[in-house]
Image (cartoon, rainbow, N blue to C red):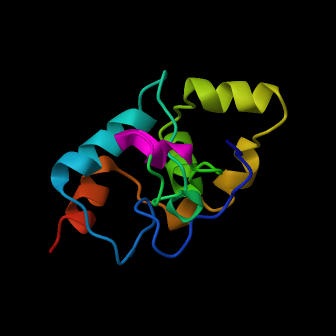
């Protein structure tokens, strides 16, 4: 998975004002994952093959990591294990993503309120 996206897309779930809505359980799932130091990966939805016939978790096969998720983690001073590894290998630059920090929700509460508004 590439860690080169630095700006969240217009409908990123981590972006302020996104037109997206999610169930509260999903918001909790993705924010918990990005705030866990071991963390996981959260691919950009624009790089996922949703037509895959593979297992249920085929969404995890995205080609690029979601910039909004990276920014959200960095804003909370939590680089996941994969973010730290990618940075050590020169595949990820936290300074680049933080240039867009104002585009991403500041807290789990703010994200929850916006994404579950409907």
Magenta region: 54-61
**For this view, does 12 lie left or right of residue 108?**
right
Q: Is residue 42 above or below residue 103?
A: above
Which quadrant is home to the C terminus? bottom left
Which quadrant would residue 94 be assigned to in this image? top right
Q: Residue furthest right?
A: 90
Q: Is residue 20 above or below residue 108?
A: below
Residue 91 x, y percent position in the rendering: 80, 38
Q: Residue at x 48, y 31 (%)?
A: 40
Q: Count up the numbered dots.
A: 0
Asked if the magenta segment contains residue 75, the reply would be no
**For this view, does 99 lie left or right of residue 103?**
right
Q: 63 or 9: which is nearer to us? A: 63
Residue 96 x, y percent position in the rendering: 75, 53
Q: Residue at x 43, y 59 (%)?
A: 14
Which quadrant would residue 22 be assigned to in this image? bottom left
């Amino acid at each position: 998975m590439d860690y080169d996206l630095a700006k969240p897309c217009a409908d990123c779930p981590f972006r302020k004002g996104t037109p997206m809505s999610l169930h509260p359980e999903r918001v909790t799932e993705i924010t918990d994952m990005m705030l866990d130091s071991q963390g996981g990966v959260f691919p950009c939805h624009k790089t996922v093959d949703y037509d895959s016939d593979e297992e249920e978790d085929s969404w995890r096969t995205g080609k690029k990591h979601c910039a909004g998720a990276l920014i959200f983690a960095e804003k909370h001073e939590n680089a996941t294990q994969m973010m730290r590894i990618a940075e050590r290998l020169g595949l990820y630059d936290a300074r680049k993503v933080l240039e867009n920090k104002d585009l991403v929700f500041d807290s789990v509460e703010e994200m929850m309120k916006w994404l579950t508004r409907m």
